[in-house]
Image (cartoon, grey):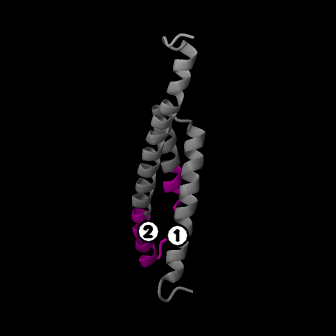
C-alpha cells in the first residue's frame, strides 16, 4: 500500500470537521453579539417604559410598531434576509417590550 497522497474524497472529508468548527465558531460569536445587542435594546425599551409610565402613556404604540415593522422588513430585504422572518422576530420582541411596559406601569406608585 502506498503512503502517497490521499484521494480527493479523503482530503475533503478530513477538512469538513475543521470547516464546521470554523463556521460554528463564527455562529457562536454572532450569537454572543446578538445577545449583547438585545440586552442594550431592552435597556433602552425599559427606559421608554418608565418614561411612558411616568407620563401616563399606554404601554403599546401601534403606529410606532407598524413603522418599525415596515422599516425592519425593508432592512431585511436589503440584507438578503427573509422579511417574513424579520417581521416575526420583531413581533416577538415588540410583544416582550409591551409586556415589560405593562409591568412597569403596574409598579408605578398610585397605579391601580
The residues tagged by marks 1 and 2 sit, at their Cα atoms, a distance apart of 7 Å
Q: Are marks 1 and 2 in contact (CB under 8 Å)?
A: yes
> Which residue is outermost to the front?
1
Q: Which quadrant of the view contains residue 43?
A: bottom left
Q: Residues within 10 Å of mark 1 (few under 14, many from 20)?
A: some
x and y percentages locating residue 73 in the rendered image: 52, 40
Q: Is residue 25 or residue 58 the one in the foreground?
A: 25
Q: Classify 24 as above or below 32.
A: above
Q: Residue 98: which quarter of the image?
A: bottom right
Q: Which residues are magenta?
A: 43-66
Q: Is residue 85 above or below residue 1?
A: below
User: Where is residue 56 shown, x and y percent of the image?
Assistant: 47, 76
In this rendering, position of residue 42 left or right of residue 106: left
Which residue is found at the position 56% from the left and 49% from the top? 89
Queried whether the magenta region covers residue 96, the answer comes back as: no
Nearest the eye: 86 or 68? 86
Q: Main secondary structure of the magenta part?
A: helix
Is residue 104 visible in the rendered image? The answer is yes
Question: Tag 2 or tag 1, which sits nearer the N-term?
Answer: 2
Quadrant (top left/top right/bottom left/bottom right) for the C terminus: bottom right
Residue bearing mark 1: 100
Whether 53 is among the magenta residues is yes
Q: Which numbered marker is on residue 9?
A: none
The N terminus is located in which quarter?
top right
Residue drawn at x 50%, y 26% as measured from the top left: 15
- What secondary structure is found at the residue carrying circle 2? helix
Disc number for residue 46: 2
- Residue drawn 52% across and 63% down? 97
Q: Is residue 80 visible?
A: no
Q: Is residue 26 left or right of residue 89?
A: left
**Callout 2 crowding tier (Cα within 10 Å): few <14, some 14–19, many ≥20:** some
Query: Is 82 or 13 nearer to us in this picture?
Result: 13
Amino acid at each position: 500500500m502506498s503512503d502517497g497522497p490521499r484521494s480527493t474524497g479523503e482530503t475533503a472529508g478530513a477538512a469538513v470537521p475543521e470547516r464546521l468548527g470554523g463556521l460554528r465558531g463564527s455562529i457562536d460569536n454572532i450569537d454572543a453579539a446578538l445577545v449583547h445587542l438585545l440586552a442594550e435594546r431592552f435597556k433602552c425599551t425599559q427606559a421608554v417604559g418608565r418614561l411612558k409610565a411616568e407620563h401616563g402613556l399606554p404601554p403599546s404604540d401601534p403606529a410606532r410598531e407598524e413603522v418599525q415593522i415596515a422599516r425592519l422588513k425593508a432592512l431585511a430585504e436589503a440584507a438578503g434576509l427573509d422579511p417574513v422572518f424579520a417581521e416575526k422576530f420583531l413581533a416577538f420582541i415588540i410583544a416582550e417590550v409591551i409586556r415589560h411596559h405593562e409591568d412597569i406601569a403596574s409598579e408605578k406608585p398610585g397605579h391601580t
